[in-house]
Structures are given as C-alpha cells and as structure tokens.
Amino acid sequence: MLSMSHIEFRRRYNLEKGDAVIFRETAEGLLISPREALVIKLLDDLDEGLKAKGITLDELISSGRQIREEIYNEKYAAAEDD
C-alpha cells in the first residue's frame, strides 16, 4: 500500500491547507472527500428526487418565494393596516 505525507496527499487530490473535508465510513473503509463534493452529491440527489415527482428546481424556488410572501402578508401586512 502506498504511503504518502499529508502534503503529497493534498497535492495529489488538489486540496489546499485548511480546505474542509468530509469523513464517511463505508463498508470498504473510510471515505474522505472535499466538502464541495458532498454538496454536489446532495444537489444531484435533490434534483433526482424532484424529477421523480415531476418538479423542477425553478418551480421549487418559485413556490418557496410565493409561500414566504404569503406568510409575510399574513403575519405583517395585517399589522401594518392597523
């Protein structure tokens, strides 16, 4: 098995000192990946789930804005009218 220093490891995997990484235990051992890789995977999983339900990301964002506006109007617009 190849043994490398932390400096060699960072160079090989294009990691800078201080970069955040994620440690995940798998059946094969410990998986170390940049935090950005996890974010990308989570976004891909979200996209897959939305597609399965026939929803686009744009629709989800738009509905979130609409819901926040409705909540704001219910909570604060009525108080402004008083």
Image: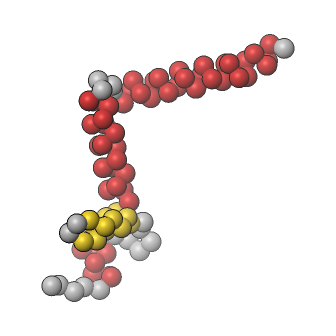
State the count of labels.
Answer: 0
Name the residue at the left extreme: 1
Q: Residue at x 53, y 21 (%)?
A: 66
76 versus 34 height, above or below: above
Q: Which of 77 and 7 is in front in this view?
A: 77
Q: Where is residue 50 in the image (x, y as percent from the top left)?
A: 32, 31
Residue 14 visible in the current orientation? no
Q: Where is residue 12 in the image (x, y as percent from the top left)?
A: 24, 74
Question: Within the image, what quadrant is residue 47 found in?
Answer: top left
Residue 26 is drawn in which quadrant?
bottom left
**Which residue is nearer to you in this view: 39 or 8?**
39
Looking at the image, the residue that sits furthest to the right is: 82
Say whether residue 73 is left or right of residue 65: right
**Residue 8 shows in the view:** yes
| Colour setting | secondary structure
Whole-percent x, y for residue 82 in the image = 84, 14
Residue that appears at 27% across and 30% down: 51
Residue 79, compared with residue 64, is above or below; it is above
Report x, y in % for residue 8.
27, 81
Q: Given the current orientation, which residue lies at the most extreme top position?
A: 81
Q: Is residue 22 above or below residue 44?
A: below
| Residue at x 36%, y 30% (from the top left corner) | 57
Pick the front one: 41 or 25: 25
Q: In which quarter of the image is the N terminus?
A: bottom left
- Residue at left offset 73%, top offset 18%: 77
Would you identify the image quadrant in which residue 69 lies? top right
